Image (cartoon, rainbow, N blue to C red):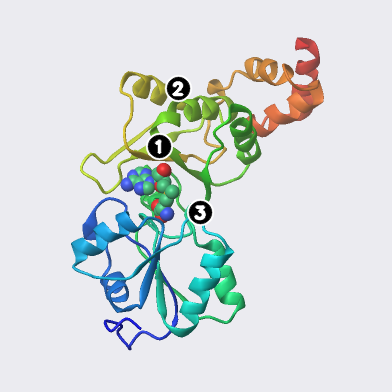
Amino acid sequence: MNSAVDLSFPPGLYIVATPIGNLGDITLRAVEILRGVAAVACEDTRVTGKLLHHLGIKQRLIRYDDHAGEETRDYLLRLAMEQPLALVSDAGTPLISDPGYRLVRAARKQGIAVTSAPGPSAAIVALTLSGLPSDRFLFAGFLPAKDKARGDALAELASVPATLVFYETAPRLLDSLAAIAAKLPGREVAVARELTKRFEECRSGAPEALTEHYAAHPPKGEIVLVVAPPGRETAAQFDVDALLRAELAAAKPSQAAAAVARLTGGDRKALYARALELK
Ligand code: SAM
């Protein structure tokens, strides 16, 4: 047993959020837990090692990433049954597009105490900065990398009456903005970049305007995309014929009309009639 263990922490799994860029965002409770547990399960021991070094904490680190098998999970569960075990990810809140879901589920099933020390998460930071409605939002993680799957994912979300939040990477930003322009036309988008860091930026506008900007100024760093809910588009921003033609390239008139109705909120029968004319 680690002699540095603070006995005031009972056995169990402690989910601990860590900063997403600004080290000042670590919470007092996170520091106490990271100091007091018997071990810290983390995605990358070098990344977490650096954070703990900055905090002046020496800890036993156990790697637990997306590739961890059942053996590692069982080991962590046995440990958490008898001692306090922290779970962190490289940055932000564990489980939010990061490992941990299976571990938490298994811990709860086995009756192991699970608690969460909340802190930063890029999705929430971006939502609060975006100026878009925050009363109802849907966090959709990363969009698929392949064009067809990305388009399908966006089409599925088009009619959700909520602000949409996506994690993104710099090399894929332009492709995602193009897909948003096609599948969620007329919706305002905020590109939230390098949050809590020195070059933090939150730029809003139509996806076409953002595409123009980022084509001229290739983005660096980490990115969250926030998309306005449906119903705030201006009718003038829709080119219904262009949308129908694009859908008709791969779908029957009835399917094309349904897809465009979903996107624009337009009348499905009228769109079907127009799709037949265009076919
Ligand atoms: N669990 C983390 C959280 O709670 O924010 C997210 C981990 S996920 C693997 C990494 C993604 O989060 C990045 O690709 C980016 O989309 C987003 N992200 C993390 N830190 C960020 C930052 N400082 N600024 C903007 N986006 C960030």
Tell me the number on the disc at residue 234: none
Tell me which corner region of the image, top left, top right, bottom left or bottom right, holds residue 37. Answer: bottom left
Q: Amino acid at mark 3?
A: Asp
Q: Are there few (<14), some (14-19), or many (20+) residues within 10 Å of tag 3?
A: few
Q: Residue at x 59, y 45 (%)?
A: 161
> In this rendering, is residue 39 above or below 127?
below
Tell me which corner region of the image, top left, top right, bottom left or bottom right, holds residue 204. Answer: top left
Q: Are marks 2 and 1 in contact (CB under 8 Å)?
A: no
Left or right: where 228 falls relative to 198: right
Of pointers 1 and 3, the one earlier in the residue sequence: 3
Q: Are there few (<14), some (14-19), or many (20+) residues within 10 Å of tag 1?
A: many
Q: Which residue is mark 2?
A: 208
Q: Position of residue 257 (x, y in %)?
A: 75, 25
Residue in the foreground of this view, choosing between 259 and 91? 91
Q: Total number of numbered labels?
A: 3
Q: Which residue is mark 1?
A: 190
Q: Amino acid at mark 2?
A: Glu
- Judged from the image, the secondary structure of the residue bearing numbered disc 2 is helix
Q: Which residue is mark 3?
A: 66
Left or right: where 115 falls relative to 276: left
Q: Residue at x 70, y 21 (%)?
A: 247
- Judged from the image, the secondary structure of the residue bearing numbered disc 3 is loop
Q: Residue placed farthest to the top in the image?
A: 278
Spatial CA distance of label 1 from label 3 is 29 Å
Quadrant the C terminus occupies: top right
Q: Residue at x 23, y 70 (%)?
A: 57
